[in-house]
Image (tube, rainbow, N blue to C red):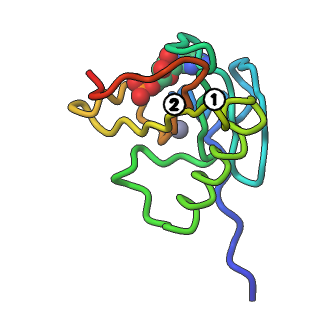
Amino acid sequence: MSPPPPPPPSPGGSCIFCRIAAGEIPANVVKRADGMLAFTDVSPQAPTHLLVIPTTHVSSLNDAKDAASLGKLLGFARDVAKEAGIDQKGYRVVVNTNPDGGQTVFHLHLHVLGGRPMHWPPG
Ligand code: 5GP
Ligand code: ZN
């Protein structure tokens, strides 16, 4: 028997990325896949700054229980970077987690940043 389908994004809820996933808040969506969405960051920190999210709510990396889904999300971010044309020169994938990690939106997301050289160490 196949597993039950995941719950849909919570429409009408307060999570901004759930609302984007549900189409309640507009976003510049660049790619969709099964249970995943990529859209441009509203406040870009690089010429290319995309956000990759699971469409069901997971608050942070700490709350992601399913390693296979995390792997899919990372592969999706890689595909998004390739389609954005930043894969050859290079890019950075960032997952800010909880306050010390700089997380401000508590729905798991991967930042995909490129189009300029990135600095190290990060701030
Ligand atoms: P965090 O600080 O949690 O790692 O990243 C949250 C990101 O979400 C920030 O880069 C911020 O600019 C972006 N963001 C916040 N609200 C919105 C929104 O309504 N639409 C889009 N496209 N990005 C958002
Ligand atoms: Zn959410």
Query: Tag 1: residue type?
Result: Arg
Label 2 residue near ligand 2, CB within 8 Å: yes
Residue drawn 51% across the image and 28% down it = 14
Secondary structure at numbered mark 1: helix
What whole-number distance in Å separates the C-alpha atoms at marks 2 and 1?
6 Å
Label 1 residue near ligand 2, CB within 8 Å: yes
Residue drawn 59% across the image and 22% down it = 49
Q: Where is the C terminus found, in terms of image quarters?
A: top left
Q: Quadrant of residue 95?
A: top left
Residue drawn 48% across the image and 48% down it = 58
How packed mark 2 is, by other alpha carbons closer than 10 Å (few <14, some 14-19, many 20 or more), is some
User: Looking at the rendered structure, which numbered label has been put on residue 15?
Assistant: 2
User: Looking at the rendered structure, which numbered label has been put on residue 76?
Assistant: none
From the image, tell me which residue sits under label 1.
19
**Percent position (x, y) of residue 60?**
39, 45
Query: Circles 2 and 1: CB distance less than 8 Å?
Result: yes
